[in-house]
Image: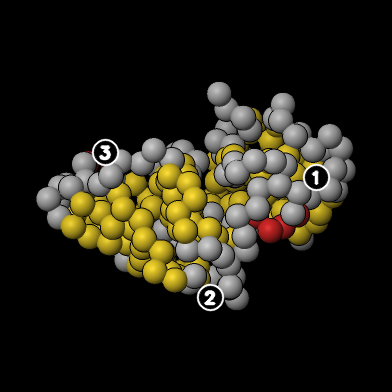
């Protein structure tokens, strides 16, 4: 059972276009993290959202945590080739000694 | 400094070899993790150390043996691996192993990984 559903799995767009990646679950999370990973490298933490309804901006990237803390989105404005990579969301549960749950990732390719 | 370092970057070993992967962080984090990542898949958790004690072992075969000599170092000893163990091995750390309600305490910072090939 995939506890965190990420969509789309693959996305290929032209430079300058906008895009949104979604991370959905039926579970409630205490916080949710977004990572970007390039081939052969480790994931790099982009942002952590911890409050329901929270919106965080990182230059052209906008992250939102759903009011019910079950979903999150990542919106990229005017995508650039340097945005190419695997985007992973990971959720932390409120209780229990349960590790982070990772989504399967969204592989983004931005073509110049 | 949010850096986690891993050595070696690449490792090729035979099925009868013994080798070790090393991970180091100087952020004062007290939780450290080993993950295995196959191509086009998300990272899979293998082990968690909290305050230098093994707290989670995700049913990993005994040919993988973790060790946490101190709060900054994490090793993964490899022995008699199989070709299917070839993968990217990632180390991560976080301030604490708190999985609930503590905001950013469970933010995990990953190292660059070791690309392991078992022949």
Q: Which residue is painted at 50% across and 41% down in the image?
A: B42
Name the image quarter holding the N terminus of chain B: bottom right
Q: According to the image, label 3 marks what residue?
A: B84
Judge by depth and name the residue closer to the eye, B97 or A69.
B97
Q: CA distance from mark 1 to mark 3?
A: 38 Å
Share a chain, discs 2 and 1?
A: no
Q: Position of residue B91 (x, y in %)?
A: 45, 58
In the image, is B83 to the left or to the right of A50?
A: left
- How dense is the environment of label 3, judged by Cα within 10 Å: few (below 14), some, or many (20 and up)? few
In the image, is A68 to the left or to the right of A88?
A: right
| Chain under disc 1 | A
In the image, is B88 to the left or to the right of B97?
A: left
Is residue A9 positioned above or below B14 on the image? above
Share a chain, discs 2 and 3?
A: yes
- Quarter-of-image position of residue B73: bottom left
Q: Position of residue A48 (x, y in %)?
A: 72, 53
Which numbered mark, 2 or 1, is in the foreground of this view? 2
Q: Which residue is painted at 86% across and 37% down in the image?
A: A67
In the image, is B88 to the left or to the right of B16?
A: right
- Does the CB distance between marks 2 and 1 fall below 8 Å? no
Q: According to the image, label 2 marks what residue?
A: B26
Is residue A42 positioned above or below B85 on the image? below
Q: Earlier in the sequence, mark 2 or mark 3?
A: 2
Q: Which residue is painted at 71% across and 30% down in the image?
A: A27
Share a chain, discs 1 and 3?
A: no
Q: CA distance from mark 2 to mark 3?
A: 32 Å
Q: Is residue A111 visible?
A: no
Q: According to the image, label 1 marks what residue?
A: A64
Colour option used: secondary structure
| Chain under disc 2 | B
């Amino acid at each position: 059972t995939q506890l965190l559903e990420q969509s789309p799995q693959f996305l290929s767009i032209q430079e300058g276009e906008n895009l949104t990646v979604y991370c959905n679950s039926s579970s409630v999370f205490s916080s949710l993290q977004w990572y970007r990973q390039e081939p052969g490298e480790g994931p790099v933490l982009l942002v952590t959202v911890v409050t329901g309804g929270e919106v965080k901006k990182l230059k052209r990237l906008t992250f939102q945590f759903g009011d019910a803390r079950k979903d999150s989105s990542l919106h990229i404005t005017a995508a650039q080739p340097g945005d190419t990579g695997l985007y992973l969301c990971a959720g932390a549960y409120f209780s229990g000694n349960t590790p982070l749950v990772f989504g399967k990732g969204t592989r983004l390719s931005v073509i110049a | 400094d949010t850096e986690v370092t891993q050595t070696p970057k690449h490792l090729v070993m035979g099925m009868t070899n013994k080798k070790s992967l090393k991970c180091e962080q100087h952020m004062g984090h007290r939780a450290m993790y080993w993950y295995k990542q196959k191509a086009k898949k998300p990272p899979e958790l293998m082990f968690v150390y909290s305050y230098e004690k093994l707290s989670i072992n995700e049913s990993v075969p005994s040919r993988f043996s973790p060790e946490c000599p101190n709060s900054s170092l994490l090793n993964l000893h490899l022995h008699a691996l199989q070709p299917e163990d070839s993968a990217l091995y990632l180390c991560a750390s976080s301030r604490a192993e708190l999985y609930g309600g503590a905001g950013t305490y469970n933010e995990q910072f990953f190292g660059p990984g070791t690309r392991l090939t078992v022949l």
